[in-house]
């Protein structure tokens, strides 16, 4: 009997390089406080956000993704032709098909790379890193481009007090490739669909098609439910990611949680008992919550500003609508 051949595995993978692109427009709390009957003080106290970045009408998720991807490729010393798979995590690509990833691969000259989108909201980037790690180590790809990108300003109601004032636009990219030493720890991921209404669309596209008076579908959230879930149920997930990677809290040098809310970030740091020496990403203060883009945007900022350096051990965790989550320990590029 003829035996099938399988891909030759690669023992280790790592993030080779990263890139980031923020929306070009700075939107202050005062700019958005009126329609939600709020104030700069209230927004800062509730979220820690001072400004958020949003893209202009002439830029979409693909434009933001391409800009971030080109920066990551340049930093890695690679071109699109070196990429074997493109993964884009987004909930704001405005076409059901074709995928954003397939179009992006063509723009970058990565054809015929495998290309697909994932919908994991704020956990999307960490989901993508987990998949890229698996593809590289399984021998299915040598270099994988992972993008977390959102233009959330397209799907907000300016009068909504539950989530609209949190959201921004941007894209972050990472190139994952083979490594001589471990660079990405085991991904701890999961979901709890029983709480899917905690972060949701107001109504479906089909409902809007049948009754246009409903208005364009936008996002809503049950703030207390999300805050409690993220603050207390995500800490054990992050702790398991450390344990599975064989590291302790005192080994962590950088912590990059999803930039959802400054109070959630503070609570996670407290729950995880991270040392005071750990650098904690707080990009939300002037970028806002960019969902799938938030972790790579925050990571690139720490590297660019010298708060973190290549080779640092970082813990990252994404969590959001679904409710879905994913965490891993990585070595920074």
Image (cartoon, rainbow, N blue to C red):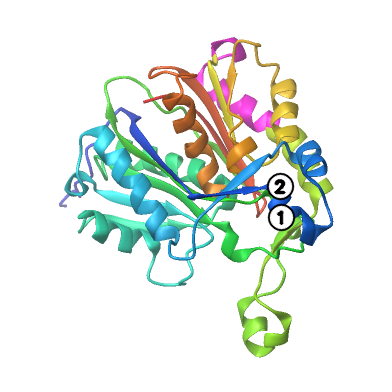
Q: Quadrant of the C terminus?
A: top left
Q: Is 205 left, or right, of 86 in this rendering?
A: right
Q: Which residue is mark 2?
A: 29
Q: Nearer the viewer, residue 127 or 303?
A: 303
Provide residue 180's location: percent of width, then percent of height.
27, 21
Q: Is 45 left, or right, of 166 in this rendering?
A: right
Q: Is 199 left, or right, of 161 in this rendering?
A: left
Provide residue 68's location: percent of width, then percent of height.
37, 45
Q: Is 224 left, or right, of 155 in this rendering?
A: right
User: In whole angstroms, how far apart are the C-alphas of marks 2 and 1?
Assistant: 5 Å
Query: Residue 235, located in which quarter of the rendered image?
Result: top right
Tell me whether circle 2 and circle 1 mark residues in contact (CB < 8 Å): yes
Q: Nearer the viewer, residue 53 or 4?
A: 53
Relative height, residue 325 to residue 101 (above, below):
above
Residue 9 visible somewhere in the drawing: no
Q: Nearer the viewer, residue 104 or 186?
A: 104
Give residue 211's mark: none
Relative height, residue 120 to residue 254 (above, below):
below
Give residue 32's mark: 1
Q: Main secondary structure of the magenta part?
A: helix
């Amino acid at each position: 009997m003829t035996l099938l051949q399988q891909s030759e595995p690669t023992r280790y993978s790592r993030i080779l390089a990263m890139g980031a692109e923020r929306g070009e427009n700075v939107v202050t709390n005062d700019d958005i406080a009126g329609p939600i009957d709020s104030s700069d003080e209230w927004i800062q106290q509730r979220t820690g956000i001072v400004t958020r970045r949003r893209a202009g009408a002439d830029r979409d998720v693909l434009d933001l993704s391409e800009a971030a991807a080109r920066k990551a490729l340049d930093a890695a010393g690679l071109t699109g032709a070196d990429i074997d798979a493109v993964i884009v995590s987004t909930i704001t690509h405005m076409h059901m098909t074709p995928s954003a990833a397939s179009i992006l691969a063509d723009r970058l000259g990565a054809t015929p790379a495998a290309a697909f989108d994932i919908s994991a909201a704020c956990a999307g980037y960490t989901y993508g890193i987990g998949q890229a790690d698996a593809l590289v180590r399984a021998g299915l790809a040598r270099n994988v481009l992972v993008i977390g990108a959102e233009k959330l300003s397209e799907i907000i109601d300016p009068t909504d007090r539950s989530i609209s004032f949190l959201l921004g636009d941007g894209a972050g990219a990472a190139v994952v490739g083979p490594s001589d030493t471990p660079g990405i720890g085991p991904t701890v991921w999961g979901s709890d669909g029983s709480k899917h209404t905690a972060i949701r669309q107001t109504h479906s596209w089909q409902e809007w098609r049948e009754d246009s008076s409903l208005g364009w579908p936008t996002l809503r959230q049950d703030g207390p439910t999300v805050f409690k879930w993220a603050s207390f149920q995500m800490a054990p997930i992050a702790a398991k990611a450390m344990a599975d990677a064989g590291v302790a809290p005192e080994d962590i040098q950088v912590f990059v949680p999803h930039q959802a809310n400054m109070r959630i970030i503070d609570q996670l740091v407290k729950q995880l008992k991270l040392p005071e020496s750990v650098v904690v990403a707080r990009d939300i203060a002037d970028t806002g919550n960019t969902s799938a883009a938030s972790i790579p945007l925050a990571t690139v900022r720490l590297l660019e500003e010298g708060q973190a350096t290549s080779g640092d051990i970082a813990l990252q965790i994404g969590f959001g609508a679904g409710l879905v989550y994913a965490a891993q320990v990585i070595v920074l590029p």
